[in-house]
Image (cartoon, grey):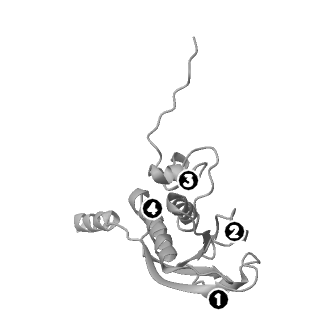
């Protein structure tokens, strides 16, 4: 009897744990007077899928992320004025809302992204190619995995997220935070 209980308890401990999927709601944001075209939205969605795929492929225990819905809204007033227009559209944790802002407006040249981990929100400026996907992958690292910025290494949460995204590299500090330390040994330089 004791062997059966021990075997059952070991079997329960060894069962794989599945994290429930987080649903992503995408809101395409048009500043007043702008149009977020279907082609631009398709490119933005491809960047979002790239960011999701980055974490699905590289995270030690990936959290399933599924794009559940998409919609387009027009923001009224100053688009950067406390994001009042966004309040009506976010779902809140455990789900995630990503606002993708059309970048053709001149006020938005230098803006990239920000996130609110507690609220499950990401605001991102639609850009081109790997920069946009890398920016979203960086913000997903904050919101989904709770990772901080790491300014002393190259990695998705560090100095060059675009390089890290292109080379499929999370970074040693972020991997350690996720419970899988790097297998890198740093040797001192000896000068003779």
Residue 173, given in percent of the width and then of the height, sits at 55, 48
Residue in the foreground of this view, choosing between 116 and 177: 116
Residue in the foreground of this view, choosing between 162 and 8: 162
Q: CA distance from mark 4 to mark 3?
A: 13 Å
User: CB under 8 Å between callouts 1 and 4?
Assistant: no
Q: Quick one: label 1, few (<14), some, or many (20+) residues within 10 Å?
A: few
Residue 128, given in percent of the width and then of the height, sits at 53, 63
- Mark seen at residue 108: 2
- Mark seen at residue 161: 3
Q: Which residue is mark 4?
A: 55
Residue furthest top in the image: 192
Tell which circle, 2 or 4, labels the residue nearer the N-terminal end: 4
Q: Which residue is mark 1?
A: 88
From the viewer's perspective, is the residue at label 4 or at label 3 nearer?
3
Residue furthest bottom in the image: 88
Image point (23%, 63%), residue name: 3
Q: CA distance from mark 2 to mark 4?
A: 27 Å
Classify mark 4: helix, strand or loop: helix
Residue 192, given in percent of the width and then of the height, sits at 57, 10
Left or right: residue 112 versus residue 77 is left
Q: CA distance from mark 2 to mark 3?
A: 20 Å
Classify mark 2: helix, strand or loop: helix
């Amino acid at each position: 009897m004791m062997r059966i209980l021990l075997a059952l308890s070991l079997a329960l401990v060894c069962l794989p744990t599945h994290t429930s999927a987080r649903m992503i709601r995408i809101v395409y944001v048009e500043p007043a007077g702008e149009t977020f075209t279907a082609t631009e939205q398709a490119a933005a969605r491809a960047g979002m899928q790239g960011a999701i795929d980055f974490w699905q492929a590289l995270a030690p225990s990936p959290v399933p992320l599924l794009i559940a819905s998409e919609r387009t809204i027009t923001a009224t007033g100053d688009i950067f004025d406390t994001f009042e227009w966004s309040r009506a559209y976010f779902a809140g944790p455990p789900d995630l809302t990503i606002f993708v802002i059309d970048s053709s407006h001149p006020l938005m040249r230098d803006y990239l992204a920000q996130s609110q981990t507690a609220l499950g929100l990401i605001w991102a400026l639609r850009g081109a190619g790997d920069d946009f996907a890398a920016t979203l992958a960086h913000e997903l690292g904050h919101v989904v995995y709770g990772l901080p910025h790491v300014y002393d290494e190259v990695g998705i949460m560090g100095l060059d997220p675009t390089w890290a995204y292109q080379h499929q590299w999370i970074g040693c500090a972020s991997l350690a935070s996720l419970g899988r330390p790097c297998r890198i040994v740093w040797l001192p330089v000896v000068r003779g």
